[in-house]
Image (cartoon, rainbow, N blue to C red):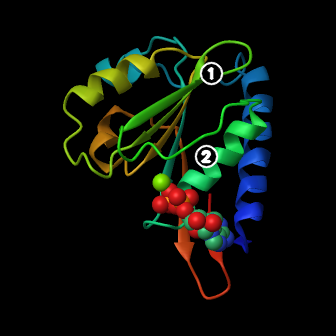
Amino acid sequence: MIIHSEQEMLDFGKQFAKTLSSQTTTTQESPHQSYAEIKEGGQQAQPAAIVIELIGDVGTGKTTFTRGLALGLGIKEPVTSPSFTISKQYALPNSGRLIHYDFYRLPDPGLMSEDLAENLQNPNNIIVIEWGGSTANLLPKNHHTIKIIYTEDGREVIL
Ligand code: ADP
Ligand code: MG
């Protein structure tokens, strides 16, 4: 899919938020992989946070997508880039938080990986990660991956 403008990227984020809320209503039939399962390789059916990994060069629109996602999730606070603070969080209207990480300036997540691991354990959380390469082994196997590529016509989004 080609996204031609910032507004279209915001709309795509909003739309994606809707697919997530329909997903949480079917949690019982297809639970997210549990954090315990990921960490221990075990079989416990404890649900974990929803994770969206955003892959794309600087300026492709990862933060813009997240801004749209937040709007779609009903977050009123403005979403700004976490590239200096590494993470920012916003309360979701019902329970849990949207947690937005940007590991660009932190090639070794160190203590932040403990923070991420803890946030992954709350099934009400929605976690968005930019530049998450170094956290790959912490993320649930079934996490969402969105790739954004510059093309001559606009940003190509690959789900
Ligand atoms: P990233 O987080 O990937 O570094 P940002 O979302 O912070 O990128 O910035 C993307 C910039 O590109 C914004 O200034 C936005 O206005 C601009 N832009 C231009 N075209 C698009 C598009 N099709 N999709 C998303 N952003 C776009
Ligand atoms: Mg960004």
Which residue corresponds to mark 2? 66
Q: Name the foreground residue: 13 vs 77.
A: 77
The C terminus is located in which quarter? bottom right
Q: Is mark 2 within 8 Å of ligand 2?
A: yes
Precedes in sequence: disc 1 or disc 2: 1
Q: Give the quadrant of the N terminus.
A: bottom right
Label 1 belongs to which residue? 31
Question: Where is residue 106 shown, x and y percent of the image?
Answer: 24, 45
Say which residue appears at 61% left-offset and 88% top-offset.
152
Q: Assess mark 1: CB under 8 A from ligand 2?
A: no
**Other residues around mark 1 within 10 Å, as few (<14) / some (14–19) / many (≥20):** some
Q: Amino acid at mark 2?
A: Thr
Residue 8 figure quarter: bottom right
Q: Amino acid at mark 1?
A: Pro
Image vertical order of residue 142 relative to residue 12, above or below: above
Q: Name the residue located 57 percent from the left edge and 22 percent from the top edge.
A: 125
Name the side, left or right, on which 97 lies relative to 36.
Answer: right
Distance from the alpha carbon under mark 1 to that under mark 2: 24 Å
Asked if the residue under mark 2 is in contact with the one under mark 1, i.e. CB atoms within 8 Å, the reply is no
Q: Position of residue 9 (x, y in %)?
A: 70, 60
